[in-house]
Structures are given as structure tokens and as C-alpha cells.
Amino acid sequence: MSKETISLWVNEAPHRVEIEPGESLLSLLRDRLGLTGTKNGCGEGHCGACTVIVDGRAVRSCVYPAARAEGKRVETIEGLARDGALHPLQRAFIAEGAVQCGFCTPGMIMAAKALLDRTPNPSDAEIRRALRHNLCRCTGYSSILRAVRAAQAQMRAAQAEPPDASAATSAAAYTSARPLAAVGRSLPRPDARAKVTGQAVYSADLRFPGMLHAKVLRSRYPHARLLGVDTRRAAALPGVVAVLTARDVPGVNRHGLERPDWPVLCDDKARYIGDAIAVAAAETEALAAQALELIEVAYEPLEVVDSPERGLEPDAPLVHESGNVAKHIHLERGDLAEGWARADVIVERTYRTARAEHAFLEPECSVAVPEADGRLTVHVGSQIPFDDRRQIAAALGLPESQVRVVHAETGGTFGGKEDIAGQIHAALAAWVTRRPVRLLYTRPESIIAHPKRHPTVIHLKTGATREGKLVALEARILGDTGAYASLGPYVMTRTATHATGPYEIPHVWIDCHAVYTNNIPSGAFRGFGVPQAAFAMESQMDLLAEQLGLSPWEIRRRNAFHTGSLTATGQELRESVGLLETLDRVQAAWRALDSPWAYQTAEGKRRGWGLACAFKNVGLGGGAPDTAGASVEITTEGHIQVRAGAAEVGQGLVGVLAQIAAEELGVGPERAEVLVGDTALTLDGGATTASRQTYITGNAARLAAQALRETLAAVASAALGKPAAPLRFADGRIGDGERWLAWEEAVALARGAGCALRAERVYRPPETRPLGQGGDMHFAFGYATQAAEVEVDPATGEVTVLRVIAAHDVGQAINPLGVIGQVEGGVVMGAGLALTEDLPMRDGLPLATNLAQYRIPTVEEVPEILPIIVEDPAQEGPYGAKGIGEIPSIPTAAAIANAIHAACGARVYEIPATPERVREASTREASTREARTREARTRAPMPGRGSGRAAGDSR
Amino acid sequence: MWRAYLTPTTLEEALAMLAEHRGEARIIAGGTDLVLQSQQGKCPSTVMVDITRLPGLDQIAERDGYLQIGALATHGQVASSPLIRERAEVLALACGWVGGPQIRNVATLVGNVVNALPAADGAVALFALDAEAEVVNLRGRRWLPVAELYRGVGLCTIDSCVELVTALRFRALGPGQRSAYERLAPRRVLALPIVTVAAVIEIAEGRFVEARIAVGPVAPTPFRAVRAEAALVGQPVTAEVIAQAAALAAADAQPRDSATRGSREYRLDMVEALVRRALSQVMTG
């Protein structure tokens, strides 16, 4: 192995760099030059996050040999801004909300720059073509396309005349129907600038002196007894510092959010292919990987439980000694027999949904650092810093005070970074070696190890009266929860309680099993079990409508939740039920498009619209502790610092908190800084999950800011000689309209008087009750209606989503730009669920382990999305706000499935609706129709049944 | 992983390097597949002979009555070349499907052939164009039909440890010839195709005069649907004739069941559907 020195230009600066044989340009940039703005999303050339420009052309730096860069000119994200002035693309990405988690952003901007440098006036198709190899999981690409167009317009304008600073941007024009001073305004995220310049620090960007690299040995078999692990050869390899097994776990060798059933390192058995057997820490990543190959493991392979059906069979092997049923969920309301007696039509069908991967662009990475004072700090981009701390401390046998978890910038989570993934392994290795340790997952490792969306089988029997009122629902649900509980029992509870959809049904019987198997665990994933239920129930709604001769709009309108409705759990919805308004707004928007519900194009393609409604709880509910804390401080230079234990995972909470604090204190949001997720510096914020943080941490920050406001009001009251209560805080001053005191002056007076200029509050939402105990299971729900237009190619079964109208009741939009971003991103994620995303497993082994085989939507699949914000305020929510994180993903797949049926008559009962499945369904439908027609000819003619569906589909 | 990365500046030098590190060294051009294979330990070669600095190999030109594409011409160059777009459209279309700009800017069409994967878009079009490849080693140069370079999935008869392909060539489409490229994939882009079909067709006076139909990746290598071609030539352009040819093309395919790309039955049906579509595309296009 011979090192080699190469010369190249990076961002116009000459460099001479020594490289290793086999080194990639990405490693040269990140590890040798410290230019960590270029991201490593997969290391396999599939995601585009590592895109840089070499000699004017976009390339993937992860598979570009560093040696080839000799003499070349390389441009990276760090070189875009000149003398502090951002490039038009960077400005446009900020203004259009095209930045969420920010991990794809540098590569995306570089790909866009490579395009605009050569093609100053690209068409829409050319923009999509240029960005098709850059995956984004947050934004749904719509805002990115807007940003590129805006930048292009600005660059063109700049050539002809001075830059037009006031160029109006499209998405930023959204405002709340009830805008306040800061709340309700579309504002750029406070972290956007760092993310578009490559300055944002994700955990893999951290470097510490003497840092070791850890790698995890994972099980060879999906199910095996562990007979012995011999690490001697691995440990003897020069450069290897520690090789750790279950014996080295000083504390509890189990973790788990719902129950501690997941070994930190396997001791008795391996239960899935991602199970961790040993951890090696070495001077380099390559040495750590080499060490893994020298570990000898004796396994006794056991029969694999490959499906929940198998898991329930009496002779099935046990995944856990406690039995294969991880959770049985049952709920009933009314009297099913009575329901069936009242039903004039009954539809009974079985639906299947696939295992889905989060495919956040940033792979898991934990960096553990032993501190001089003996404590341990773990930097990680995860969803629950305080639970990470609890679980790390328990495994290491340390008091929680000895462990500090610092939430790093996080490149997307979507539920997939709730469970422990490397935090404990990195901490353990650092604890043992007393050196900083970085553990970065490879992309295949990420896909194999972390929990997925539950594959489900949902059998629904639904009855309605002739008038179209739902009267009975029987649901039997089976979920593959995989090898460990993760959050599976809660997820499947949500599938069960949301099985009715957002509809009143008096007689309900729902039975659900979450079953252990030897597959990859299933856990949280945006929507938390509800997208699966929505696909099934919304398909049923269309089937019933068809039988009843009702339109898809009408059957939903007749059954939709409204104030006073009871859910399946018997909870009365007392307020903030914006469902009907979302339905009406979608219908009005569809009418305005003047697009037929179903028609055939000149090329013989079939087009159709489909509808789906959804509801989703906000907050954990079910009696779980659901509190969060926040503090607000006014610093001596007059800034507002908000601190909260919640996680910023791309969703935009930092902006929401800044706007809330600014609103209460009457200053501009640019004055507010937000620090999140540091267990040493913030109050516990609980999990960033269940669409809960705007509501809960938002309320905590609001209460803390209000406490400061009262302090300032008291001071101002004395200074102005006016009563405190009616004083207004606006535009950086405090007063009653006649007399005003400058905000800074009030702050100075308060400080001078010795008042505390920091307040902390813990917000506890209204009480909820566990399932089966009556009362409110949840304190708030979001509601949505989406309509999707698809085009089906009858020859191949290919489906293209053309347009999606998405109306969401968010109570109150704190930052409408952020809401739009959640809706667009959620819709595209839902489209993936509907059409392309599937992680099949056979005998406990995944059949897709990279981002080429697991197919999330690219920019080429993105429909036109028309978001509509509905604001039916929730009394307790901050300014009436609820949550928006998950629900945009819930109705989309169902709406697309219904649209496929409208378009071509084919009903898919299994998603993703692959071309093969659609064609199969379409062939099935055609033969049924033919048989029906034959039958009809021999008997009486059948009355036309309604919805203008394309008839006479010949194939 | 490689231990040495060599950058020759002449063809002779490149061949000498291969000879010097006999068996250990391998030609690398775009390297989009090879770099990853090497990083993942799936390529035994320890010396990479990078030919991207060899002069003149990135040309796309008309020469001796052929369209000739140099070994360093990327998919991006081929897809946007006016010469190829006007006179061998099927190849420009196929190359345009490959990856995104990051791949098209780097991956060479010759590399696509030498990699010998049946899913390679460009290669399927080259089959329909009856393309030839110029193979150079220390013994000299020879032209071989592209179809002869394939001997199985990922297996090329060219040994990149001793020789290299320096160019591809084929006859430009004549004035009466039209071409089409059809592709079906589980995701529109960045996904291996379920079926691809490249067709070059000549029609005169309502009859098929010539038909070349290449199909991938439904067999170990791309292949020409010769029975379908024969069924077309001399026949009138009717839906029945086209349907019959499409069925014959499917009969020659041997796809495997794929958990992620569809069942064998579906893929056979899709060969038929795409051949039909390519032929109608040619007629209407």
C-alpha cells in the first residue's frame, strides 16, 4: 500500500493532499480537508447527497476516486457563498422552505448549480432531469423545484439589471388565516443558512482528537442460539483497541422503549439479521471492519419465524420466551349483531400493506466522548435525547447524571430514530477505551438494523344503511412487529383505534395482534400504524359508496367526524374537528380545476381521481406521560434564547419555538435563538413523535415566554405609570398605545431591579386514559382530506400521480411555510407507500438493502401538490395549533388506490400498487365485468351504478 | 480495494501497464460500477489503470460510413450528441435513461457494454443497431460484434486485465429507418428496468422492410428477438402482424421471478407490451 500525493483545486484554492490507495473524493474532502458540508448518505452512489462539481460537471464524490481528481477543479457547498453573500440558489432554498433536515441540501444545491451554470434557462423537465439522482425524504421536492426556478429567475434578472431583492416567492406567500405578529407568518427557518452553506454539524461531521471508529458485528442468521463468541484474534489485530461482547455490558443488557426486550449485545439468542453480536473499536473504520471478520461466532441456527401468520401457529418456535404475541389489542363499542341487522349493504375485504423503510438521508451516527470530569457525552441525531440518556446509563450501569446526550443536527428521522441505534455501542466503547468513539452506520446496516413500518394484513367488514350511514365495522388486524417490541405495541394500537377512519360508527369490534417474528423489528414510522388502517378503510368507503350509488364525497360527508362525534374508543370529540371543512375545501379545489373524475387520454391512458380522509392523534395519549419543558431567557445583549429538550429532526420546531417566543415578547423572531435536545442544558421534552412537539413544547415555550412577559410588563407598568395587564407588546416596545417603553429599556430596568430574566415551564397536556378505560384516549386530533389524480397505463399497469389536493386541519399554522413543507413531504412519502416502497423479506432476510433497491420517490415522480391549510383551533394548543408531522402521509396511499380504481376500474387490495399488481387487478376486473355483462345479457339489464367510471375497458 | 491508481496518457502506456501488472491490473474508465465493486471488495484487481486521460477517446464522429463512439464518451455526451440524436435516436434515448447527471457525466457507454449487464440501457440499443466494438490489445486491433462480447450476466468476453475496447461503431439509420426505445421500471428513474426494448424499423409502402428488435433484461444477456423480426419483414403493417411479432419476442425471453421487479409471467407479458409499444411508437413517432 503506497500513499500518493495529488494536487487539485477545491473551491478555487490549490491543495496538495496525501491520499490512501482506494480513497474516494468524498473522503478526501471530508476527512482530509475538513469540508464536511458534502454529505455521505449511502456511500454507494445511490442518494446524491455527496454531489460535488468537478470541472463543471456534477459527480458523486463517494464513488469518484480521489486519485482521479489530480489537477481538477472541485466545487463544494462551502465555496458557493462569496464574502458572506449567499449564492442565489442558497437564498432561494431558504426562502422557499426547500430546506428541512438539510442533509440532502448541499448535494441538491450543487446538482442544481451544475445545471444552471450550463443551462441558464432550463425547462421544468430539465430541472427534474438534473435533480433526479438527488434523493430528498423531507420536502417532497416541490419546494426544491420552486427554489431552483426562483434562483434561475433571479440569476437571469441579475445579468440584465441589479438583483431584485424583493422578488416575490411563491410558497412564502402562504399565511395563516389568523396571522399574529410572528405566529402565522411564513418565515425561513433559523437553521436554514447553516444548512445551505454546509456549516450545519451532524454527528458524523464531528471530529475529536484520538477518536476511534467502531463497527458492529451483526448476526449471520435471523434466528440462532449463540453458543460462543471468540474475539481474541480480532482483539490482537494491531490498531484494534477494544472488541466488546455481551460480557462487557456492565449494566442492563437490554433496551427498548415499550419494554426492555432488545439486547445491547446478544447473549442468549440472535432474533433477527440486524442483531448486534459484538462491537469493535479501532484506530480507523477499515481496521474496525477488518476486526469484525476475525471474530468467531458459534451459532446454532433455529427455525425462522418468517411471518406473523407463522408466529401464531401453535407449533411455531418462540421468538421470545414470553410468547409470540407481542400485544393483543381489542376494542368494542355498541353491539355488532345489532349493527349487521341495521346494515343494508356489507362490504368485506382483506388488505395488505408492505414493510417500509424510513430512508432518512442521514444514516445513524453516534459519537461518544469521555469528558475530563469522568462523565460521558454522546452526540447523536435521534428523536428522544432524554430516553437515549436513560437507556445508555442503564446499559452502562451509570447514574443518569454521568451521561450527557447532545442532540446533533439530524438528517431526518420519521420515526426511525426513536429506538437505540448505536448510542449504547458507541458509549460502551468510549467508556471502556476512555477515548472518543464514532459509530457510523453504513446504509445497508441502517436498513437492516432499525425498525420499519409494520407490514399488516387488515380484514375489514363494514356495513352501512341504504342512506349511506355506517353502522358496523368488524376489523381483524395482524401486524408483523419483527424481532423486538420497539414501539410496535403502541403502533398497532393506533392501527386498531384508527381502523374506523374519521367516521362515526356506532357498532365496532376491532381485534389486532402485533406478532413477534424473526424479521427486522417494526416500530414507529410517520403515521404510526394509521396509514395502513386508512388504506383499508378508505377503500371500503369507496366500495360502499359504489354499492349505495353515492359519490365518494357524499358517503364521507354523511359519516365524517364532527363536534360531538364519538370515536371507536368512545371518546367524544368536543372541539377542533375540522374534517368537514377539509373535505369541502378539497372538493371546491377539485371543482375549480374542472377536471373530470375519470377519463381516457388521447394516448389511451386512463385518468381518475380518488379521495381519502384521515385523522390522527396529536400527542402520545393513552395515559402516557406527555409533558415537555422549555425555558426562555433574555440574554444581556437582548437576544431571546429558547431551550427545549425536544429534537429538531428537520420538521422545523426551532422556527416554531422562535416564533412563539417572539410573539409573546413582542420582538422579531430573528432575535430568538433556539437550542434543543441537550440533556445538560434543557428540560426533558419527551419524544419527538406523535406530531406532538408544536403543541406540547410549543406550549411550554409559550408559558415560559409569558412568564418573562409578565416580568417585563410589571417593570413597564411602573415606568409608564400604567396598569400592567392591558399593556401591549409589539414592534419591540411595550405600552398602551399612548405611552411606550422601548423593549430594551424594559429589559434593562428588569435586570437592574434584579428580576430573573429566565423562566422555565413544563407543560402538561390534558389528561388522557389508556385504551379500554373510557374517557379521552387523546387530547387532540388532526384531520385531513386528500384527493389524488392518477394516470394508469392499462398495457403495463404503471401509475403516475399527477396532482394531489391536500387539505389539513392544523388548528393554527404557526409557520405556514413549515406546514406546507410537511404536507408536501408527507404526500410524496405517501405516494411512495402507495406505489413503489416495499422492503420484502424472505426467511428473515431482506431482499432490498440499498437505496436503489428500496425505492423512495425521486423528483421525477413528484405530482403537483395543492396544499390547503384549514385552521379549526384547538383550545389548549398554542394559539390553537395542533400537529402536522404525520397526517400528510396518512390518506395519500388510500387516495391513490381509490384513484387507480376510478381511472381503470382496478381495485388494489395490496400496496404498493406495483405495475404488476395494478395490471393483475385490472385484468381481474375486466374478466369480472365481462362475466357480469354476459350474465346481464341473459337476464335483465343492470341499472347504471353511478360514478361515471370508464366502462367497456377492453383488454 | 486497489493499492495503485495509474493514469497513463497513451494507449500504449495503458497496455504496457496491464502487461506489467498482469492479472492484477484492470482498465477503469468512468468507473461508476467498478469503483463501488472495488470499495465493497467485489473486485480482485489491485491496480487500476485509469484511461480517462488518453487523448481522443471521447469523440463521437462519423468515420468510414459508420458512427463511431470513443471509449471515453459518456452517456451524457451520447444522449446529447446531435449526431446520435439525429442518426441513431434509439441510442440517445437509451443513454438518456441512465441514472442522473452524476452518472451520465461519468459513466461511459463502452463501460456499459464491457460491464455486460443485461439491464444496461445503452447496450440494448447497441444490439438493435448491430454495433461493433474495437478491441485493442498488445497483439493489435479487431472489430467484434457487440453481441459477441456477452457471455452471461456480468460476463464479458473482453478481459479488462489485458485488453480494452477503444470504440463502438454502427451504421447510422437510413432515411427510411425509424427507431424507438421503451423502458418499464418499478420506479421511473434510478431503478433497474423490468423490461427494455430497442427497435430499429424500416417501413416502405405499408410493409416492414427491416426490423431489428433488442430486448433486455429478461435473459442472461440482451438479445435480438430474431423470430419476431422475421415475422415482421415483408409483412403489412397491421395490428395483427405486430401482435404476432410481440408474442414471438416474449416467447424468446427467459426472465426470472424477481421479488422486486415482478414475476416471470408479468415480465413476459411486458416484453410483449413493450415490443408492441415500440413498434407503434416507430409508426406514429
Image (spheres, rainbow, N blue to C red):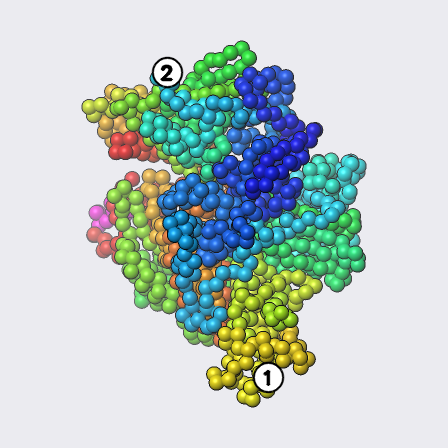
Q: Residues within 10 Å of mark 1 (few under 14, many from 20)?
A: some
Q: Is residue A470 magenta?
A: no
Q: Residues within 10 Å of mark 2 (few under 14, many from 20)?
A: few
How many marks are shown on the rendered structure?
2
Q: Residue at x 73, y 59 (%)?
A: A403
Give residue A714's mark. Answer: 1
What is the distance, in whole Å, between disc 2 and disc 1 at their CAs?
A: 92 Å
Q: Is residue B133 above or below residue A205?
A: above
**What secondary structure do most residues of the magenta stretch adopt?**
helix
Is residue A427 shown left or right of residue A799?
right
Q: Is residue A694 above or below residue A485?
A: below
Three-letter amino acid code at disc 2?
Answer: Asp
User: Are the residues under marks 2 and 1 on the same chain?
Assistant: no
> What subunit carries mark 1?
A
Q: Give the quadrant of the N terminus of chain A.
A: top right
Q: Secondary structure at mark 2?
A: loop
- Given residues A680 and B86, the one toward you in this image is B86
Residue A844 visible in the current orientation: no
- Given residues A197 and A776, the one toward you in this image is A197
> What subunit carries mark 2?
B
Q: Residue at x 54, y 65 (%)?
A: A670
Is residue A294 shown left or right of residue A310?
right
Q: Give the quadrant of the C terminus of chain A.
A: top left
Residue under numbered circle 2: B64
**Residue sitting at the far front:** A161
Find residue A389 and report its horizontal and vertical position in percent.
Answer: 69, 59
Find residue A260 and report its horizontal and vertical position in percent.
Answer: 68, 57
Q: Range of the magenta residues?
A: A928-940
